[in-house]
Amino acid sequence: MALSGGADRGSHSMDKSITLPPDEIFRNLENAKRFAIDIGGSLTKLAYYSTVQHKVAKVRSFDHSAKETDGDPLYEISVQEEITARLHFIKFENAYIETCLDFIKDHLVNTETKVIKATGGGAYKFKDLIEKKLKLKVDKEDEMTCLIKGCNFVLKNIPHEAFVYAKHADSEFRFQNTHPDIFPYLLINIGSGVSIVKVESEDKFERIGGSSIGGGTFWGLGALLTKTKRFDELLQLASKGQHTNVDMLVKDIYGGAYGSLGLTGDLIASSFGKSATTDKEFSKEDMAKSLLHMISNDIGQLACLYAKLHNLTRVYFGGFFIRGHPVTMHTITYSINFFTKGEVQALFLRHEGYLGAIGAFLKGAEEDNPNQYSWGENYAGSSGLMSVSPDLNPVQRARSGTFDMLEMDRLERQLVNLPLLQDPTSYIPDTVDLTEDALAREYWLFCFEEALDGVVKRAVASQKDQPEAVERAEKFRQKYRHKLQTLRHQPFAYGSLTVRSLLDTREHCLNEFNFPDPYSKIKQKENDMALKYYLKVVKSVEELSWEQRQFTLVKGLLAGNVFDWGAKAVSDVLESDPDFGFEQAKQQLQERPWLVDAYNQWIERMKGPPHKCALFFVDNSGIDIILGVFPFIRELLIRGTEVVLASNSGPALNDVTNSELQILTERIAAMDPVIQTALKEDRLALVQNGSSSPCLDLSRLDKVLATVVRERGTDLVIIEGMGRAIHTNYYAMLSCESLKLAVIKNSWLAERLGGKIFSVVFKYEVPSKSRGHH
C-alpha cells in the first residue's frame, strides 16, 4: 500500500527549473553523511545528517593570582569554532529528482557514506537511478516502521508538533503542547487505503486494523463521478459543493428529527441516497462533497471505535488524504468530534509529510544513537507550515511547488521537565498566543521589526575587527525580516506564534550568520562595573532593620531587573546616559502598591522557617545579577536556605550565561565570606538550564538541573525578568512555593496589563495543596 500515494500537492504544469538557489536548499552538503530518502507518488523527501561549524563565544577567567590592577577586565571572551550536528530534511516534487541527485553528486565530498536508506512507494521505481547517480547502495526500509519512528521523533523533539484544526476560528491551527510522555497513541494513516496503528513505545507498535476505503477510494470514485483525474481538483470541487443535494438526510425520510432515536434532521441518513430516486443531473461539486463526507465519516467512525476499544485518547491522522488539506482536515475533525461526542480530538502533525524520511534516516543512524539526544527545530533554516487553503493568494500556493525544508539541531544537553511542575500535561510556557490574538500579534511583529536596526548595529559593533561583519549583519537583517513577513501572513508557520518564538527565531538567525554573542562586550563592561559596588550594597543592607532589609533586597532585585538591553525603553536610556545606575533605577520603579503585589504575603512567609532549597532562574548580566540577585540570595543563605542559581547554557541578549556566572561568583566569593563559605559547603550551586533563550520553557530543561532540584528537595522557585516571568510562565502552576517578579519595560504591555512602564509584578504563589504544611 503506497502511503504517500500520488496525491501530494503541486501542479504538474509547474516550471521544472529549481527556483531557489540550490545552496540554500541542500545546505552543508560538503559535510553530509548518512542519507535517507522517501519517495511517494509525487513528492520526494530527502534526509541527511551534517556537521555545522559555528562560532561560539567562550568566556574564561584570567589568572588572578598576580597582583590585580583596577583596570583589568574580569575575564576574556574568545570566539571559538564549535562543531554541532544538524539534521536536514528537504521535500520536493518528483519531477526535480534528477536535478537534485546531480546536485548532490557534485557536492558530495564525504566518501564514508556507502548506503542510502530508502522507503516509500516510489523507492523501487527510482532505485537504479539513485544507485547510478550517487554510487550509493539503496537499502530499503519497511514503510510502517519508518513512519512510526519519524512520528515518535517529532512528537518528542518539537513542542508544537501536533495541532487541532478549527475551520472557523481566527487561527485555523491550534497547537497542542506535546506532553513529554508521548505514548500510547493511535496513528491513522489515510493513504490509498487506511492503516490503523497502535504505538505503545519507541519500538513497540502494531497495526490493529484498517480499511480498503481510503484516499484512493475517494480519488478513484471521484474520478469516475466527475471525470476529474487530479486529486487537488477533486478537493477544490468538494469545497464548493452542497452534499445535501445528493445525500438523503434524516428529515428527507421523516420530515424532521427522529426524536426517539436521538437523530437530528440534518444528519446524513444515506450517502448518495437521493441519486436513486431523483432524475436530475447532479453537479460535480455536490457529488465530490458527498463522496468526501461518506469516506471521511466512515474513517472517522472506524477511528473512534478503535480508540474506544484500546482506550486511547490521542489520535493522530496522516497520509496523503490529509496532508495539509484544510478540506479533509475539517471533515475528519468534524466526524471524530461527532462520533466521540467531543471526547477525542483529531490531531494532525505539522511535519507529517516528513515522517517516513525521518524514520528511514533514524534507522540508518542507529549507531550514532540519535534518540539519546534532544533536538531542536532551527527556525532559521526551516520553511515552516504553509497554509494551502485553496482560496489563499496564488503566491502562497506556488510556494508548495518549490522546496520545503526542516532542520533540526542536536542540543548539547538532554532536556526534561522541571520536576516541580504541578501538571506537566497542561503546562503551557507562553502567556499570550499571538496566533489567536491579532492585536498583540500586530504590535509585537512591529516591535521586532523596529528593533532590527539596533540589533544589526549591535552585531557589527561586537565584531569591529572583522571587515566582512557588515555584510553578514546585512544578510541576518534580510533573513530575519523575511521571517517576520512570513509570520505576518502565516502566524502558525512554526507552531504557536509567541514573543518567545520571535526572540528565539532572532537568536537562530544571528547564529546562522556567526554572531553568537552580540552583547558579550557590553556584558563584560557591566559586570566589571557592578562588581565595584557589590560590597557597598551589601554593607548598606546589613545596617538596616530586618523588615527594612527585606524590602530593600526585593527593591534591589527589581531595580537590577531594569537593566535589560533587550528592552528598547531601557537600551535608549543606557545608550544616552552611561551614568544611569542602580540608584536611578530604584527611583524609576513604581511605588507600592505594585501592579501585582504579593509582598505582604511574602514577608509573612519570610518570618516563618527557612526554605530548604531555593531554585533561582536568573536574568541579566551586570547590575541585575551582581547588585540585585546576589544580595538577595545572600540573605537566603544566611537564613539557612540552600540556593541553586540556574542560568542560560548559551548567550541570548545580555542575559548572564553559566560560564560567565561561574567567574562572577568566584570574584564575589573572593570579596564576601558568606558566599565563599556557601560555595565551599556546597550550599550554593550553579547549574546551567539547557537553554539559550531570553524566555524559559520549564518542560525543556537540562536533565542535570532536574536531578539537582530533586536531590536538594527544592521548595521555592524564583523566576525573574520579563522574558521568563511575564512572556512565559506567568500562569505556570508549580507544586512548591514560587516567586515571579519583573519590571515591565514595555509601555504597550504595561498598558495591556493595566499599568504604566516600569510597573512592578511581584507574584508570590503557594500551591493550594501544601498550604497546611507551614
Image (tube, helix red, strand yellow):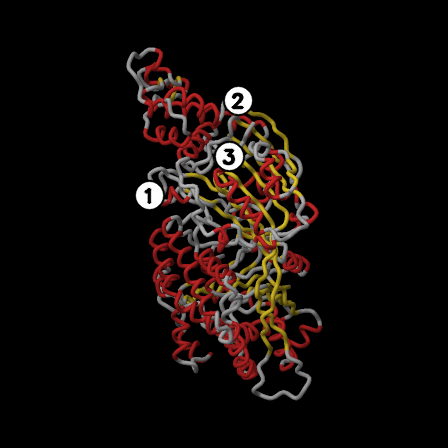
Q: Residues within 10 Å of mark 3 (few under 14, many from 20)?
A: many
Q: Position of residue 595 (x, y in %)?
A: 40, 64
Circle 3/circle 2 CB separation < 8 Å:
no
Name the residue tied to disc 1: 393
Q: Amino acid at mark 2?
A: Ser
Q: Position of residue 712 (x, y in %)?
A: 67, 61
Viewer-proximal residue among 401 and 131: 131
Residues under labels 3 and 2: Cα distance? Answer: 16 Å
The vertical placement of 216 against 9, above or below, is above
Determine whether, in the image, residue 35 is placed left or right of residue 573: right
Q: Amino acid at mark 3?
A: Phe
Viewer-proximal residue among 585 and 470: 470
Residues under labels 2 and 1: Cα distance? Answer: 36 Å
Which-is-in-front pick, marks 1 and 3? Answer: 1
Question: Residue at image x 51%, y 47%?
Answer: 177
Identify the mark nearer the N-term, 1 or 3: 3
Q: Quadrant of residue 476?
A: bottom left
The vertical placement of 303 against 103, above or below, is above
Instruction: Examine the rendering and report whether any part of residue 243 can be seen.
Output: yes
Instruction: Tell me, for residue 212, which label it has, or none.
Output: 2
Name the residue tied to disc 3: 317
Identify the mark nearer the N-term, 3 or 2: 2
Determine whether, in the image, residue 112 is placed left or right of residue 737: right
Q: Amino acid at mark 1?
A: Asn
Instruction: Tell me, for residue 237, which label it has, or none.
Output: none
Residues under labels 1 and 3: Cα distance? Answer: 27 Å
Which-is-in-front pick, marks 3 and 2? Answer: 2
Viewer-proximal residue among 338 and 296: 296
Is disc 3 placed on a helix, strand or loop? strand
Identify the mark nearer the N-term, 2 or 1: 2
Instruction: Examine the rendering and report whether any part of residue 186 can be seen.
Output: no
Q: Position of residue 353 (x, y in %)?
A: 51, 39
